[in-house]
Image (tube, rainbow, N blue to C red):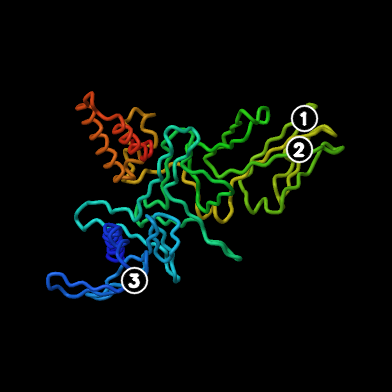
Amino acid sequence: MLRETTSIRTGVLLVCSVLPMCAQEPATPAAANVGGAATVTGSGTPQFVPLWRTTTSLGNSGIFQKGMRLGIGTKAPGAQLDVRALTLIPAFSALGASGPPGSDQNASAGISSKGGNADPDSGLSVGGAGVVGKGGASSSGAGPGGVFTGGSGSGGDGIDASCTGTGCFAGNFTGNVNVTGSITAGKKDFKIDDPLDPANKYLLHASVESSEMKNIYDGTVILDAKGQAVVQLPDWFEAVNGNFRYQLTALGAPSPGLYIAQKISNNRFKIAGGAPGVEVSWQVTGIRQDAYAKADPMVVEQEKNPQERGEYIHPELYGAPEEKSIEWARNPAWRMQVQELRAKQLAQARNAAASASPSASRTENAELGQYPKGLR
């Protein structure tokens, strides 16, 4: 596959270098004999890039040129290079080069893509996306916009994303998000329009944190003539939870004798010891005991793996340089590229002259901005 991809890429580059000449050639059969060389014959269709059918015969290739656009599998290219599969195979396949054994070199990327820059003089224009993906339609199940699988071995993430600007997100989702594993974060918030000033403010709350997989349930109940009440819980309650803790608070009148008369059993518990007719606020917490929680229990303190040991999620909070960031350790290729870029910038700064081009420094800063904050 690598040899195939490389050959295609080399062929396209070679074709592009002679396209202006090819576009001027007649479409009628032609023959040439220069300096006693073999006669070359062939015919073709206008705007198709020629292909050597034999060592001496030319004909149409599968590459079509319309202006400066190239189409493979289409005569109406909608992009600079438009590739459309004509059989049930991928329209495009790319395979990066592997590091030679014993070289200690990183492998190359299968695809490297960067969106174009917006008009720098306009506050309304937006930079182009590096990649845009859209799944195919289906009556039973549409295709996803993208499928990512990490490489085998430590640190082979399915996808790595970063936000290097201001007011951006490393990931921005419109719609529901489904995760079958766990989610880890420095903090987890909900964010809504502030109900008191929804047009101008946000309201943020932090989620409840615990060292246990804890569920919290609460409600209110009115005590009967005996100062008692039974709280009925959902049918699934004890199947999901265990190790219960209780809290009771009387509302509107003191009830110092309130207590849990019967613990949770058959998805209900009983309150007693209060004054008749008093409203009681109750809260029950339970620790998850469902099948998934048992199969994947929470490990509160975890040893860092050897690659991350000695590194920090936020090194600046512990007086360590940013080179001690875990992201540096997990992405050695980025680390080397950033170090090389910094060395280049430092050399330019030391040797800067009055005639130095300001656009050059802007280019370097733009390149540096492609890396995650922890790698810059």
- Identify the mark nearer the N-term, 3 or 1: 3
25 to 261, vertically: above or below: below
Q: Amino acid at mark 3?
A: Gly
- Identify the mark nearer the N-term, 2 or 3: 3
Labelled disc at residue 251:
1
| Residue 198 pos. (x, y %) | 65, 31
13 to 300, vertically: above or below: below
For this orientation, the residue located farthest to the top is: 354
Q: Amino acid at mark 2?
A: Thr
- Identify the residue under disc 3: 44
- Identify the residue under disc 2: 220
Asked whether disc 1 touches disc 2, contact meaning CB atoms under 8 Å apart, the reply is: yes
**Label 1 residue SS:** strand
Mark 1 Cα-neighbour bin, 10 Å: few <14, some 14–19, many ≥20: few
Image quarter hosting the C terminus: top left
Image quarter hosting the N terminus: bottom left
Which residue appears at 56% of the width and 49% of the height?
177
Which residue appears at 67% of the width and 31% of the height?
195
- Identify the mark nearer the N-term, 1 or 2: 2
CA distance for labels 1 and 2: 9 Å
Q: Amino acid at mark 1?
A: Leu
| Residue 108 pos. (x, y %) | 29, 53
